[in-house]
Image: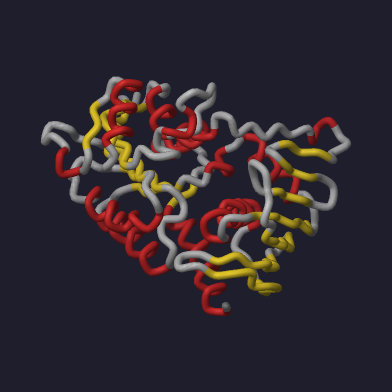
Amino acid sequence: MILAIDTLILGLGRIGLEHELKKNSIKTHSKSVFFNKNFKLLCGIDTKKSRRTIYEKKYKSKAFNNLNKLPLYFSPELVIIATPTYLHKKNFQDVVKIKSVKYILIEKPISYNYSDTKYIINICKKKNILLFVNFIRRSNPGLVNLKKILNNKKKNYITIYYNNGFINSGIHYLNLMKYYFGNPINLEIKKIINKTKYDFNIDVDILFKKAKIYFKFKKKIINDMIFEAENFLLKNNKIKGFKSKKHNIIINLKYYQKDVLKEILNYIKGKKSNVCLGKDHLNDMKIIKKIKNEI
């Protein structure tokens, strides 16, 4: 029997706290931990006083403005890093100073570049800390079932429409396609839309052993990315097109952080798990590095 895992949430922004304050769903880290008996919400960390006040009132848990304020008797085992990506490396360096930390769940991507991602993964390996990356879709039962269907085909031709940056947004489905089909064989950039300080938007073909995936930038997408294959369409988290009842897959992302915690717990217990490990995410960043070198 595993005791409740003391959990610290670093970052009480949209995904940490604010996304669903008035919603009947489990899409934030605070809520997912609070309602899971296998985890204990130890405290939250955020620089904004307004967020700390909301957190303390809603979850009856202490909140501090930085890790240096953490009382010595607080010994978190799991730390969830839910800050903006550009802060991850600094936040991580502070977190690993806490001797009690056994597990880290970090928002995707770990970093905007390959070298910092590799650095964080290597430090976790040295310190024997399990590193998980918050790719929510591979913890979703419906999308896990879709993997079985796609792998029964000799070849899949899929178009994925994304916006808001390939590293920030498109990487969700890049990681999912790797989970479905393994590491890619090759890629071909079709069009460079634009580049920013940290990210870029492109149209690119990525070839896998059993699939050819076309990532296409689309300026206006409502709610979620669009996943279009030969015989079905995944849009707004609903699949249309399968004629057979056995292919009636339900994609429910209403409780996605609950699903992620379940997969993390399975991994900790030594059970089968679909959670993304840091070393798996490093392969995402190898692809990102290759694309960056070509654009």
For this orientation, the residue located farthest to the left is: 72
Taking 67 as reference, is 212 above or below it? below
Looking at the rendering, in which quadrant would you find the C terminus? bottom right
Specify the quadrant of the image occupied by residue 115: bottom left
Where is residue 293 drawn, in percent x and y?
52, 78
Specify the quadrant of the image occupied by residue 15: top left
Residue at x 72%, y 49% (from the top left corner): 227
Q: Nearer the viewer, residue 165 or 244?
A: 165
Taking 208 as reference, is 7 above or below it? above
Residue at x 41%, y 56% (from the top left corner): 110
Q: Position of 219 compared to 199: left or right?
A: right
Where is residue 66 drawn, in percent x and y?
21, 43
Taking 202 as reference, is 276 above or below it? above
Q: Position of 196 compared to 203: left or right?
A: left
Q: Is residue 186 visible?
A: no
Where is residue 43 drawn, in percent x and y?
26, 31
Taking 41 as reference, is 65 above or below it? below
Where is residue 99 drawn, in percent x and y?
18, 44
Q: Position of 67 compared to 54: left or right?
A: left
Looking at the rendering, in which quadrant would you find the N terminus? top left
Residue at x 84%, y 52% (from the top left corner): 230
